[in-house]
Amino acid sequence: MGYTHYWHQENGDVPSDLWEKFVSDCKKILALIQKSGVALCYEYDEPRSKVHCSKDMVRFNGPNELGHETFILSPNEIDFQFCKTAQKPYDLAVCSCLILALHHFGDYISVSSDGDPADWTDAVRLVFQTFGYGDFPFTDEDVRERFVEDYVPQALADLEAARKEIGLDRLSEVEIEKPI
């Protein structure tokens, strides 16, 4: 079938408050991905179109030959969905959005993939560095443990370096006035 990500929405429609938080985070992460040079659009054969993030759905693809199957996620319970990316550049956006969905939706969604942990590393790192969380999509405990051993030390070192670079490491040294 090719390199594909799968998700199953369970337990009814995603509550609107969870969906709104998810859409807000998707807008941020997709903008970062585009800023990094990964082209995204609404549909592969509409390369000038914009990514769609709304109360109804999140939808995007890569343009032209950089696209494959369109990623579509809605708050409505749909038994089974998938997106075949063929590991094209927009795969980073698909993985990132699925990680965001896992974080925000909890028991409302399950995710699986033809990819292995290494294929998700960039997306987990990007979500973690952007939002401070990065739910790992694989449920197999051996795979999770191996990923945590390989990924977490580097992710924490990257986060600490980024904090130092922007001066967040000095916040603990600053006296904060307490209101009277």
Image (cartoon, helix red, strand yellow):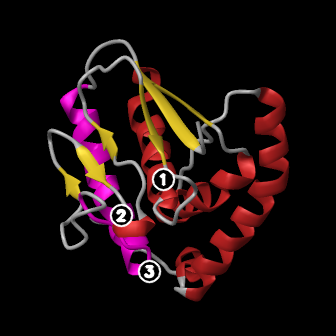
Q: Main secondary structure of the magenta part?
A: helix
Q: Give residue 37's mark.
A: 3
Q: How many marks?
A: 3
Residue 45 vertical placement versus 95 (above, below): below
User: Which of the numbered marks, if any, corresponds to residue 30?
Assistant: 2
At label 2, the amino acid type is Leu
Crowding near the residue tagged with mark 1, few <14, some 14–19, many ≥20 C-alpha atoms within 10 Å: many
Query: With 81 as the anchor, is 137 left or right in this view?
Result: right
The crowding category of the residue bearing disc 3, from other C-alpha atoms within 10 Å (few below 14, some 14 to 19, many at least 20), is few
| Quadrant including the C terminus | bottom left
In percent of width and height, residue 78 lies at 31, 21
Q: Which residues are magenta?
A: 15-42
Spatial CA distance of label 1 from label 3 is 15 Å
Under mark 1, the amino acid is Ser
* Residues at circles 2 and 1 in contact by the CB criterion of under 8 Å: yes
Secondary structure under tag 2 reads: helix
Say which residue label 1 marks. Answer: 96
The residue drawn where x is 60% and y is 42% is 2
Of the residues under marks 2 and 1, which one precedes in the sequence?
Answer: 2
In the figure, 116 relative to 178: above or below? above
